[in-house]
Amino acid sequence: MSTIVVRHLHKVYPVAIKEPGFKGTVAHFFRRTYRSITAVSDVSFEIAPGEVVGFLGPNGAGKTTTLKMLTGLIHPSSGEVEVAGYIPFNRQEAFLRKITLIMGQKQQLLWDIPAMDSLRINAAVYNIPEAEFRLRVGELTEMLSLKGKLNQPVRKLSLGERMKAELLAALLHRPQVLFLDEPTLGLDVNAQVGVRDFLRQYNQRYQATVLLTSHYMADITALCQRVLVIHQGKLMYDGSLDGLLESFAPYREIHLELAQPLPKENLQLYGDVQHIDGRSVSFIVSQENLTQTVSQILSHLEVIDLTVSEPPIEETIGRVFQTGVL
């Protein structure tokens, strides 16, 4: 049985239209007209217990709107949603105990008091007994490497430490389903690695189901074997990350070191020029034309060095977002 079930999910927002100027303001006050903006359109997927799934899409694609519908914060315009056996927008207490929503740009810990005090408030909200509270805080503190940090005012913690403390607060009630919206946003590389390692451990220890959105592809590649790709409110892809790359990246990157610089218009004869820095040039070419293109380059240009590689995953996903086609 799936932990998350989404069928034909739609969300449409009415947006008021206002003409500029004083006349438009008066008309808008007495009689408003609206247009409809579709944020999510006919999205369907299922996520199994214990699965970690990446949710990808450009800004405005509908990711956060979908997460808010899955957590019951907003009501869908149509469609069906079931999370851990509950309908989210009913906001039943038993449902709220099974989920958590972590947004990298939001915080729940109070700024001027120690994180431990905020954790005690959370424990009271979820009716966690004192002995169980101490046990869970100790376990999560060890997993997050926060020993000695929770008794300091939150404002004195580093950004990475604050994010870890936010994770601890959000997971204190040991939720079954984690909705993570940019959990490593703004963190340095070391802090990002620490958060990823913790999420991996938490998933393995408690078999939690995780739906993760992130603009850092390292988060996705480190944690997710399956990805959902949403573009302009529509689900474009649901499958393995490797499958996405294979289906949408039938091309290679050619790096050249030339004997002398050449103008871009001359180089475009051989492929899609991605980068020029003096004598260093990078092309993108289709895999089927790779052999022919390399042969032409070696025949027509003075080449000191040539290497062929797969383009970075960020470029591949970027092309998915740009074209909106799989």
Image (cartoon, grey):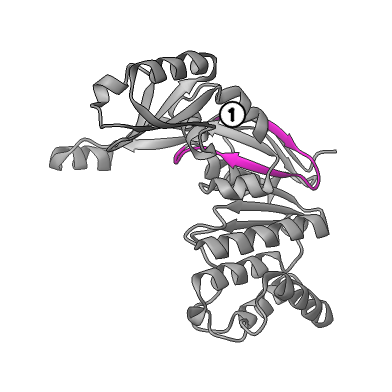
Q: What is the magenta range?
A: 41-60
Q: Quadrant of residue 76?
A: top right
Under circle 1, the secondary element is strand
Residue 8 lies, with reference to residue 100, above or below; the image says above
In percent of width and height, residue 115 lies at 60, 79
Asked if the magenta segment contains residue 80, the reply would be no
| Image quarter of residue 16 | top left
Give the residue at mark 1. Answer: 235
The front one of 284 and 78 is: 284
* Percent coordinates x, y for residue 172 in the rendering: 72, 69
> At which x and y percent is residue 269?
33, 16
Q: Is residue 52 magenta?
A: yes
The disc labelled 1 sits on which kind of residue? Leu
Outermost residue, right direction?
1
Q: Give me the residue at 55% from left, 26% from top.
A: 249
Other-residue count near label 1 (Cα within 10 Å), few / some / many at <14 / 14–19 / ≥20 = many
**Is residue 24 at least partly visible in the picture?**
yes
322 to the left or right of 276: right
Report the front residue among 173 and 38.
Answer: 173
